[in-house]
Amino acid sequence: MTDTITLTRPDDWHLHLRDGAMLDAVTPDTAADFGRALIMPNLVPPVVTGADAAAYRDRIMAAIPAGADFTPMMTLYLTEGTDPDDLVAAAKSGLITAVKLYPAGATTNSASGVRDIDKVMPVLEAMAEADVPLCVHGEVTDPEIDIFDREAVFIDRVLDPLRTRLPQLRVVMEHVTTSDGVEYVKGGGDSIAATLTTHHLFINRNHILAGGIRPHYYCLPVAKRESHRRALLTAAMSGDASFFLGTDSAPHLDQAKLAPCGCAGIYTAPNTLACLAQIFEAEGALDRLNGFVAVHGAAFYGVPVNGGTVTLRRETDAQPVPEARATPEGALTVFDPMVPIHWTVVG
Ligand code: NCD
Ligand code: ZN
């Protein structure tokens, strides 16, 4: 049995680092294991302009521990007021890597998102022309649509029509949670890819709701039934370069999660690699892990793979779930995959 595995230093293509004290508390966890991460722009207020992204990037750089080999890749938050010239200039200068589309009201801090896709067509056309990828939170917000169906309906109502209108726009369907999403991306050619999170490879909706309500498993898009989880796992382990890791590690203080109306988001940065090694090994696909965490995403975004490596070791004893992080404002619970994890990052 393999006792150690050395990976190319991986990338996290979907990460929330927040700001202020939370930024300081969580950045070291990602910087320890990852070479780069695509930083989500859903701050309050959001990161909308090139100047916002430059200032946020400086704040992130200040939170990276000395000596860590970590580069934040920035995104802009698409609004109906986004200036295409500012966006394209930010992309051309290398300041931003992608732009994020949140349907207004779809998830945490999405109130400034897009209500009417027609209003952002000129921006999307400029992005297609300049080859700036669009990262999509793929859920409709129509209250008539059941929350478990919102991803599949988004594909039919928004994503597919958009890609028909603008075939040259490159799109990443973020945190895909359904077999519908997997099938759409598989059949979609080179202009579409998908990120998969760590937690959606482990949990289904029973983890949230069966035997008691567990707010720490609540995230958006919400975890679906087991057959969908299996489809995500199959995609992650298939070796298909259209699928790559975006953890969607999304820290919220425990007091915000454990509330009558708790926040969506799961904090997976500290144990993501250990969890992934465990589940890829259990499925007999450890040889596919490097592609998923370090190669496919870099290829889609047109950057070389990272120079360094990260090594994990398989311990005889199951390893404890990392301790909750202490922040000045309260505790931050780390994702518990609810299965024994024997792998640990050793260097
Ligand atoms: C994210 C957050 O907290 O910012 N929450 C989540 O449940 N994933 C937003 C998002 O990516 O939807
Ligand atoms: Zn997210």
Image (spheres, grey):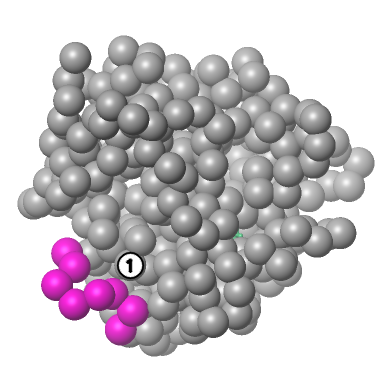
At which x and y percent is residue 63?
33, 79
The span picked out in magenta is: 62-69
Q: Decide whether the magenta segment is chiefly helix, strand or loop.
A: loop
At which x and y percent is residue 169?
43, 47
**Residue at the far front in the pictured view:** 317
Please name the residue shown 46% across and 39% down the image.
Answer: 198
Residue placed most toward the observer, 190 or 58: 58
At which x and y percent is residue 2?
17, 20
Which structural element holds mark 1?
helix
Q: Is residue 22 toward the left or the right of residue 45 in the image?
A: left
Q: Is residue 199 toward the left or the right of residue 116 in the image?
A: left
* Residue topped by disc 1: 28
Please name the residue shown 35% across and 50% down the image.
Answer: 12
Instruction: Please tell me in which quarter of the rendered image ligand 1 is found.
Output: bottom right
At which x and y percent is residue 175?
53, 41
Quarter of the view holding residue 113: bottom right
Q: Please say if 157 is above or below 268.
A: above
Q: Residues within 10 Å of mark 1 (few under 14, many from 20)?
A: some
Q: Amino acid at mark 1?
A: Pro
How many numbered discs, if any? 1
Asked if residue 191 is among those painted magenta in the image, a careful observer would answer: no
Quarter of the view holding residue 96: bottom left
Please name the residue shown 16% across and 30% down the image.
Answer: 4
Residue 141 seen in this snapshot: yes
Quadrant including the N terminus: top left
Residue 289 seen in this snapshot: no
Residue placed most toward the observer, 112 or 45: 45
Residue placed most toward the observer, 126 or 71: 71
Q: Please say if 269 is above or below 147.
A: below
Mark 1 and ligand 1: say if the CB distance to the nearest ligand atom is below 8 Å: no
**Residue at the far right in the pictured view:** 144
Please name the residue shown 67% across and 68% down the image.
Answer: 109
